[in-house]
Image (cartoon, helix red, strand yellow):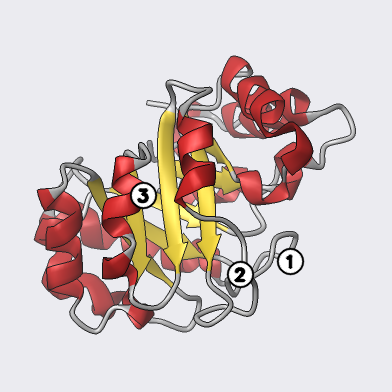
């Protein structure tokens, strides 16, 4: 099974949102990643359910909403109603993580937990039965275009071992931050199944479709024995 590519619209041209989403869809990206920031949990403000609904309206791909916000429980229903297939919350922003994940699942969406680079994997050990997606942040959240943190490869490998030991084949391991044709092969080799790519896709000189193809090509050049997915 090949790794899934999830272009992050944080890096797209918002004046041409529909065209950009259609381009990555037609290029074969399996997911579309929607980064939501509130200016409190992270030092930036981005988008809300209206944009998520607009994305849903132009693609049949998986819409993956990443909430980098405080009090995520207040907004989860609105994003699911807007068409989110997956909703991920940060362990650091959710003091009652079991309750928050249960809410996502009760609304019949896939439940994800994101971990900042400094947050240990132990933060999710008690909720593995409730998650469908484990998001490893390979940059500090808040802005696109940041440099990849090299230690993330090893953390992804440990994340893969953790989820496989508890729920083999049931939890996606997603990597968000600094994913590019250079870093993607090592991440897939470590066990990542979903690659969030923002500037590497939407900032590609040949356009977003070419960006998707560049990441895909880099991953598929791995010898089959080195692919963990």
Mark yes or no: residue 195 visible: no
Q: Nearer the viewer, residue 129 or 82?
A: 82
Residue receiving disc 3? 79
Element carrying mark 1 = loop
Q: Quadrant of the N terminus?
A: top left
Count up the numbered dots: 3
Marked residue nearer the N-terminal end (1 or 2): 2
Is 46 positioned to the left or the right of 38 in the image?
Answer: right
- Mark 2 and mark 1 in contact (Cβ < 8 Å)? yes
Q: Residue at x 61, y 15 (%)?
A: 26
Considering only vertical position in the picture, is 40 above or below 129?
Answer: below
Is 58 positioned to the left or the right of 96 in the image?
Answer: right
Task: Single out the residue that lies furthest toward the right.
Answer: 205
Are there few (<14), some (14-19), or many (20+) residues within 10 Å of tag 3? Answer: many
User: Disc 1 vs disc 3: which is toward the camera?
Assistant: 3
Q: Residue at x 48, y 25 (%)?
A: 57
Residue receiving disc 1? 147
Q: Residue at x 75, y 60 (%)?
A: 145
- Mark 2 and mark 3 in contact (Cβ < 8 Å)? no
Kindly identify which numbered label has been placed on residue 198.
Answer: none
Question: Residues under labels 1 and 2: Cα distance?
Answer: 7 Å
Considering only vertical position in the picture, is 116 above or below 62?
Answer: below
Marked residue nearer the N-terminal end (1 or 3): 3
Residue 15 % position (x, y) = 77, 38
Q: Residue at x 14, y 51 (%)?
A: 105
Is 100 positioned to the left or the right of 91 in the image?
Answer: left
User: Disc 3 vs disc 2: which is toward the camera?
Assistant: 3
Marked residue nearer the N-terminal end (3 or 2): 3
Q: Nearer the viewer, residue 83 or 183?
A: 83
């Amino acid at each position: 099974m090949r790794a899934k590519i999830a272009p992050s619209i944080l890096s797209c041209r918002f004046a041409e949102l529909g065209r950009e989403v259609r381009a990555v869809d037609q290029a074969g990206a399996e997911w579309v990643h929607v980064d939501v920031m509130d200016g409190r949990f992270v030092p930036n403000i981005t988008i809300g359910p209206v944009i998520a609904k607009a994305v849903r309206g132009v693609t049949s791909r998986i819409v993956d909403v990443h909430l980098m916000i405080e009090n995520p429980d207040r907004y989860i229903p609105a994003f699911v109603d807007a068409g989110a297939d997956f909703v991920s919350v940060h362990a650091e922003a959710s003091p009652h993580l079991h309750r928050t994940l249960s809410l996502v699942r009760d609304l019949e969406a896939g439940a994800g937990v994101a971990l900042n680079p400094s947050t240990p994997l132990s933060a999710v050990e008690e909720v593995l039965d409730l998650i469908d997606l484990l998001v490893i942040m390979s940059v500090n959240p808040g802005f696109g275009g940041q440099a990849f943190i090299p230690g993330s490869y090893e953390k992804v490998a440990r994340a893969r071992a953790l989820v496989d030991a508890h729920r083999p084949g049931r939890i996606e391991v997603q990597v968000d931050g600094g994913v590019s044709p250079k870093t993607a092969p090592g991440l897939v080799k470590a066990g990542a199944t979903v690659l969030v790519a923002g500037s590497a896709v939407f900032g590609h000189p040949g356009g977003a479709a070419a960006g998707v193809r560049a990441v895909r090509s880099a991953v598929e050049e791995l010898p089959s024995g080195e692919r963990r997915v």
